[in-house]
Image (cartoon, rainbow, N blue to C red):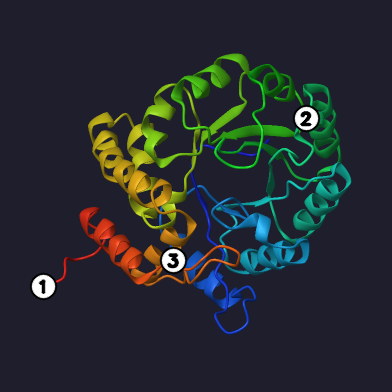
């Protein structure tokens, strides 16, 4: 079974300003820089990667580009959750063939009222049966157009041999602890909020897929290392550094803010894909101030 312990970066997807197409050179540039830090893996086509604005062919292209530059020890995971079981299986097989080592599958939610625990159980089991690589269940943020997977259902799914873990982005530590308690031994629970990385691991999480690691990969990865080595004071200090950065940038500004921050830090961020709007100049100035407060940029004279 795949090893999920550590910090994963849910990578932004850069787009070419002239055409709006995926900027593969920009993605490779970002991946090479992120790979210099102590991260366990990269997640493409997640929420921060604007997955719902990418078509299936683009996701496969992203995987091929990433597989060319990432060291094998950095786990490459791809979001493949679509609205039909058939399409999710097709995409999961395609990204695995392109080089993905795991898939992150959010629940289908368009027909929300029909998505009973029975329907979702059948969906995830069918995907896991057919996927050539391990499946990670995605508890997406409840503020988004998604649905909540009951703990009992996730516990059932945890017993499937090809379902390796769950990413919980609901932002409540008590729910993380509930998953750890109810799921099978060895099932890996990942937090989805940089504000909860250290406390999440304290209640039993294996690590996290945290958007703040896009801009602070070193601090995020070192936090996990410090916690794993029992250096709780150091881990706590690093949490105090990335927690406010998550709250102000990821939660406070959103995808456009993360991408603007990457631009300031010498990565390739760029504008989000429409209908998401680019950040206004005053908001970009706010992002820069957030980075200065986090110690990631020098203050302007």
Residue 192 image point, x, y percent: 50, 39
- Binning the other alpha carbons within 10 Å of mark 3 as few (below 14), some (14 to 19) or many (20 upward) gives few
Q: What residue sits 65% from the left and 39% below the top?
A: 2
Which residue position is annotated with label 1? Answer: 301
Which residue position is annotated with label 3? Answer: 33
Residue 117 image point, x, y percent: 77, 23
Q: What element carries label 3?
A: helix
Q: In this view, does 183 lie above or below 34?
A: above
Task: State yes or no: discs 2 and 3 in contact (Cβ < 8 Å).
Answer: no
Q: In this view, does 25 lie above or below 2?
A: below
Q: What element carries label 2?
A: helix
Q: In this view, does 154 lie above or below 269?
A: above
- The dot on residue 113 is 2
Q: How far apart are marks 3 and 1 (CA)?
A: 28 Å
Residue 260 image point, x, y percent: 40, 66
Tell me if residue 222 can be seen: no
Q: Nearer the viewer, residue 290 or 101?
A: 290
Quarter of the image containing the C terminus?
bottom left
Q: How far apart are marks 2 and 1 (CA)?
A: 56 Å
Q: What element carries label 1?
A: loop
């Amino acid at each position: 079974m795949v090893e999920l312990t550590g910090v994963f970066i849910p990578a932004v997807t850069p787009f070419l300003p002239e055409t709006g197409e995926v900027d593969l050179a920009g993605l490779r540039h970002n991946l090479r820089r992120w790979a210099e830090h102590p991260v366990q893996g990269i997640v493409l086509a997640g929420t921060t990667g604007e997955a719902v604005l990418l078509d299936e062919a683009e996701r496969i292209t992203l995987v091929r580009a990433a597989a060319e530059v990432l060291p094998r020890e950095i786990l490459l995971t791809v979001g493949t959750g679509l609205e039909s079981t058939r399409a999710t299986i097709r995409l999961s097989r395609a990204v695995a063939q392109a080089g993905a080592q795991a898939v992150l599958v959010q629940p289908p939610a368009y027909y929300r009222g029909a998505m009973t625990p029975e329907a979702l159980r059948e969906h995830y089991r069918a995907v896991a049966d057919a996927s050539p690589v391990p499946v990670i269940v995605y508890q997406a943020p409840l503020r988004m157009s998604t649905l909540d997977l009951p703990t009992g259902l996730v516990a059932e799914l945890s017993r499937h041999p090809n379902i390796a873990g769950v990413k919980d982005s609901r932002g409540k530590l008590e729910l993380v602890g509930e998953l750890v308690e109810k799921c099978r031994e060895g099932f890996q629970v990942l937090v989805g909020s940089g504000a909860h990385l250290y406390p999440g691991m304290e209640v039993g999480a294996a690590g996290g897929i945290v958007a703040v690691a896009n801009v602070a990969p070193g601090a995020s990865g070192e936090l996990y290392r410090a916690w794993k080595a029992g250096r709780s004071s150091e881990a706590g200090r690093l949490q105090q550094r990335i927690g406010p950065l998550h709250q102000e940038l990821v939660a406070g500004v959103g995808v456009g803010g993360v991408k603007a921050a990457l631009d300031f830090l010498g990565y390739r961020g760029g504008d989000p894909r429409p209908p998401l709007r680019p950040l206004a100049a005053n908001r970009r100035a706010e992002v820069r101030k957030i980075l200065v407060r986090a110690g990631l940029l020098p203050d302007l004279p």
